[in-house]
Amino acid sequence: MRLADWMKYLEKQQEKAREQRAPAKPAAPAPPAQPTPSAQPRREASPEATTPAVPASQAPVAKPKRAVRPRSRSRELDADLADEVRQRQELLEQAERESPEAERTRLLRELLDPELSLQQTAVLLGVSVTSLRRYTDSGVLPHLRTAGNQRRFRLSQVLGFLAERSKRKAEH
């Protein structure tokens, strides 16, 4: 997925979120109910007959309406999403502004000194993945971390490590 496609996707998601939070328009009030004519004439009831004889202590008390809290969390999420969209747009614009020389240098580095995964490096060195993790944890083999906290290795550093290790083996 290209960065421009990702930006469009994020903008659509932000728009959907706004639409969901927007209060629904109230429906038109229902017309008042018309009294239906009945066969018998209505008798007027006395006020005592319509009011139930319930002591005041047992009368139901209307519950106070719950105060609606402001949606500060959703506003925070909106702000975070807007910041992320803005950052991605800046990255996209920066990529478009890059000089051809910088792009060429980046491409050459990618081709000549690629990043290797943990598994690829373990195969290249002929060691297990666990041993490779120990090497990186002890600082013997330099590595990079991705945004997802995964280890990545530069081919040049792995080859340097191999040369150093073979020198040590030759000395012993």
Image (cartoon, rainbow, N blue to C red):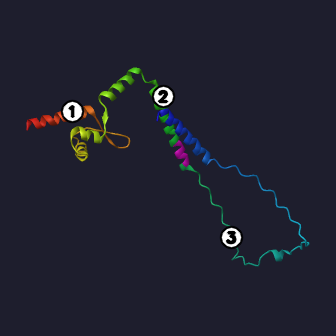
Q: Residue at x 8, y 36 (%)?
A: 171
Q: Position of residue 43 (x, y in %)?
A: 89, 74
Q: For mark 3, give the secondary structure.
A: loop
- Residue 160 — which label? 1
Q: Main secondary structure of the magenta part?
A: helix
Sequence-first tag of 2 and 3: 3
Q: For mark 1, give the secondary structure.
A: helix
Q: Is residue 36 above or below residue 24?
A: below
- Answer with left or right where residue 106 lies relative to residue 23: left
Which residues fall within the magenta stretch?
74-79
Whole-number angstrom distance, CA of label 1 to CA of label 3? 81 Å
Position of the C terminus by quadrant: top left
Circle 3: residue type: Val
Q: Residues within 10 Å of mark 2 (few under 14, many from 20)?
A: few
Q: Residues within 10 Å of mark 3 (few under 14, many from 20)?
A: few
Dots 1 and 3: beta carbons under 8 Å? no
Q: Is residue 32 above or below residue 101?
A: below
Q: Is residue 154 above or below residue 41?
A: above
Whole-number angstrom distance, CA of label 2 to CA of label 3? 62 Å
**Along the viewing direction, whichever of 73 and 40 lies nearer the viewer:** 40
- Residue 93 — which label? 2
Sequence-first tag of 1 and 3: 3
Q: For mark 2, give the secondary structure.
A: helix
Q: Is residue 88 above or below residue 131?
A: above
Pair 2/3: label in front: 2
Q: Position of residue 6 (x, y in %)?
A: 49, 37
Circle 1: residue type: Gly
Residue 141 in the magenta stretch? The answer is: no
Q: Residues within 10 Å of mark 1 (few under 14, many from 20)?
A: few
The residue to which callout 3 is attached is 61
